[in-house]
Image: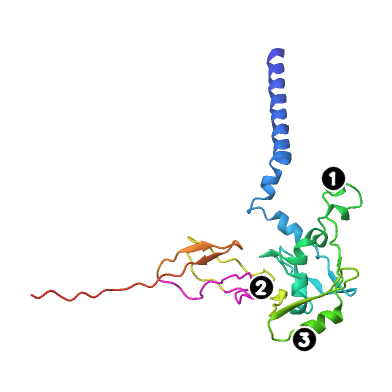
């Protein structure tokens, strides 16, 4: 009897060790793979759960955050978006980040380790720092003068202070409004979804900094369509090539 109890205890201990080893493998070895899985929405939810830091021009913010009340809670807003678009770029929940929003993404989103009060503090507490602000050297008056000077003409202006190398103005026209591409519209369904009707997003006009998101037609398509996946991760229909019909003359009876 004592021998059977000892064997059962050893077996239970081995099972416990196996569980601990498997948990450590999942938490330490497989964690990066699970984080990068497209089906894992937790990083995106945590990323947009707090307001993003602001980009400052002349000490005043030209960006902001708006509470949507959804899972991806805060989305980006812009003041004088077309004028500062060559500086700020855009931060979209759908298309990612560009320009200064991309370069300083760690600071603006609060994920940069230098924002933590102590080394490895966030890794231990699982806390997230508030987003930090990014101060630019852009002169608001010079930026506006360059933007209004170009008007509707195509061109670019870059004003640099020779003694320090500071960029005082950076304008490119025609420009676009980063706020018109918030990335909150639903993704179009891919092939095999069973439906070919969805609404067109606000980014279908192609004014989102060169990245377009093509919405699908709002009418039913009676024939199957081919699809291709774009660089933004969206499915777009492949145009059907025109067909030619040849009419043969009937053979004499």
Of residues 11 and 179, the one nearer the viewer is 179
The span shown in magenta is 200-222
Q: Earlier in the sequence, mark 1 or mark 3?
A: 1
How far apart are labels 2 and 3 at the CA level? 23 Å
**Nearer the viewer's eye, disc 2 or disc 1?**
2
- Residue 168, image x and y in percent? 85, 74
Please report the residue visible at 84 percent of the width from the left and 49 percent of the height from the top.
122
**Nearer the viewer's eye, disc 2 or disc 3?**
3
Q: Main secondary structure of the magenta part?
A: loop
Question: Mark 2–mark 3 contact, CB under 8 Å?
Answer: no
| Number of the label disc, if any, that sits on residue 149 | 3
- Residue 245, image x and y in percent? 29, 74
| Number of the label disc, if any, that sits on residue 124 | 1
Of residues 219 and 142, the one nearer the viewer is 142
Residue under pointer 2? 208
Q: Is any part of residue 67 visible from this angle?
A: no
Of residues 160 and 151, the one nearer the viewer is 160
């Amino acid at each position: 009897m004592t021998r059977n109890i000892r064997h059962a205890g050893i077996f239970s201990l081995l099972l416990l060790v196996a569980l601990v080893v498997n948990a450590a493998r999942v938490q330490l070895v497989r964690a990066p793979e699970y984080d990068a899985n497209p089906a894992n929405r937790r990083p995106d939810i945590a990323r947009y759960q707090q307001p993003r830091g602001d980009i400052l021009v002349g000490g005043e913010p030209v960006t902001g955050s708006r509470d949507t009340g959804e899972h991806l809670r805060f989305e980006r807003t812009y003041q004088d978006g077309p004028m500062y678009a060559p500086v700020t770029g855009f931060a979209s929940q759908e298309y990612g980040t560009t320009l200064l929003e991309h370069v300083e993404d760690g600071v603006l989103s609060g994920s940069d380790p230098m924002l933590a009060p102590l080394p490895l503090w966030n890794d231990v507490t699982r806390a997230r720092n508030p987003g930090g602000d990014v101060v630019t050297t852009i002169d608001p008056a010079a930026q506006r003068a360059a933007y209004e000077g170009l008007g509707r003409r195509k061109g670019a202006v870059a004003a640099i202070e020779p003694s320090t190398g500071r960029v005082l103005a950076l304008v490119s026209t025609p420009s676009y409004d980063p706020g018109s591409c918030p990335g909150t519209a639903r993704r179009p369904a891919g092939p095999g979804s069973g439906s070919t009707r969805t609404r067109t997003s606000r980014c279908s006009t192609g004014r989102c900094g060169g990245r377009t998101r093509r919405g699908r037609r709002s009418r039913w398509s009676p024939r199957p369509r081919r699809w291709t996946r774009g660089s933004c991760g969206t499915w777009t229909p492949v145009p059907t090539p025109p067909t030619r019909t040849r009419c043969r003359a009937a053979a004499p009876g």
